[in-house]
Amino acid sequence: MVSADPVRPPLLQDQLPETRRVVPIDNLKGVLVAWIIAGHAVLGYAAIGGWPYHEVSEATLPPQLELVLAALLGPTALFVIGAFFFLSGLFAPGNIARHGPSDFLRQRLFRLGLPWLLFTLLIWPLLMWFAYRSAGRPIPIWQAWQARQPFLDSGPLWFVQILLYVSVFHALWSWRGYGGELQPRAINLVLTAACIAAASFAVRLWFPARSQQVLDLHVWQWPQCVGLYVLGVLAADKGWAERIPPHLGRRCGIAVLGTIVVALAIMAATGVANLSRDDIPFLGGWHWQALTLDVVEATLVVAGSVWLLALAQRWLTHRDIRLTRWARGAYAAYLLQAPVLIGLEIAERSLPWPAVIKAVTVATLAVVGSFAFGRLLVGRMRLGHTS
């Protein structure tokens, strides 16, 4: 059980009009977005998929290397998105209290709903149309929009859609005056992980992991996303945004590392050698492997999110103005990664390089390019707001 600290430490923050910025969290978001962009670049050349360029990729990573990358990098894929929901939940109650449910809802619709709608109806179909044409497989523009699987795919903005739904529900809940009921004296992370694991197992009986639904809803990932958002809301008044209790951060770190070791041992014991072929029993259904994955994922997403925040509060406290500006453009960089990645992958298509070199090159250039354009976009929006 974790209780709130009686004395809150001073915030590591910059004060902006009507906005509280916590430097470690801004920096953490920047690191996580960079990690996602680099991961998408690699997945574009992986047989397992995960980034739609693999549908038309001209080169593929060796299966052995893909397995090694999955062992080293794969665990983070199970909790990075959940960490964003956790961070969003941490600040949502304060935003609702400061602006009111109606303004909070309006801000969410503009910040989340509008980009998702543009990507779904226009930007993402156009990008995939260009990708197919570059591969010598021209398709009609309407087919890139209508015939994509899943229908109305929004690319990397699928989680923005889910966060919008969760935020709308939270605003309506607060509007009815129920917000004060979600303030427990202590938080049990083990119980939280157990609830997420049980809900994931139940949901994946009908919607296995990596399954596709209309609007790319990722229903199989909802227990994780909703659970971490609620965890953030519950922890909002515990001072966790400024300081995770040190003993809690250490225990979560131990839980993450121990879970990864156990997961790798299970993979080795069950003979998983090809992720695109051997992982089917883990994705859902009445299989012990599916339950194992659900428990591993729930443990990683709960302990990992708290641990990452604790690490950021210790190591990502740098207040350098340039670094802060880049970090604050993380959301814009996330939105812009799709055209940057697809553009780089198309540009490298004709180069006679192995998939490994292409993946590393695209990852490096995409991270730099996405954040550069993101910083430029945020700067222009702020200039327009103040002029």
Image (spheres, rainbow, N blue to C red):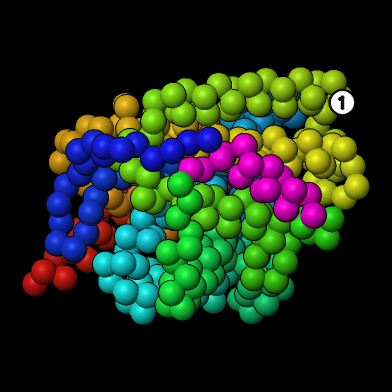
Q: Quadrant of residue 59?
A: top right
Q: Residue drawn 39% across and 30% down?
A: 245
Does the magenta portion include 201? Answer: yes
The answer to if 359 sits in the magenta stretch is no
- Expressed as whole percent of the image width and height from the top left, the position of residue 53 reads 61, 52
Decide if residue 133 is on the left or right side of residue 213: left
Residue under the point 64% across and 70% down: 215
Query: Badge 1, how many Cα within 10 Å: few under 14, some, many 20+?
Result: few
Q: Give the tally of numbered discs.
A: 1
The reply to whether residue 12 is in sight is no
Q: Residue furthest right?
A: 286
Q: Which residue in the rendered view is the most extreme toward the left?
A: 387
Residue drawn at (36%, 55%), measured in percent from left and top? 91
- Image quarter of the C terminus: bottom left
The residue where tag 1 is placed is 270
Give the quarter of the image for residue 270: top right
SS at badge 1: loop
**Residue 171 location in percent, x, y?**
44, 72
Q: Which residues are magenta?
A: 186-202
Q: x, y percentage for residue 55?
A: 69, 53
- The correct choice, above or below, for 34 with respect to 259 in the image is below
What's the magenta bit mostly, secondary-structure-wise?
A: helix
- Look at the picture and state if 134 lies above or below 289: below
Q: Write the residue at 32% across / 74% down.
A: 100
The residue closer to the viewer here, 50 or 161, is 161
Residue 183 seen by the camera: yes
Q: Nearer the viewer, residue 347 or 172?
A: 172
Q: Amino acid at mark 1?
A: Thr
Q: Nearer the viewer, residue 8 or 327?
A: 8
Task: Where is residue 302? Give x, y as percent.
Answer: 56, 40
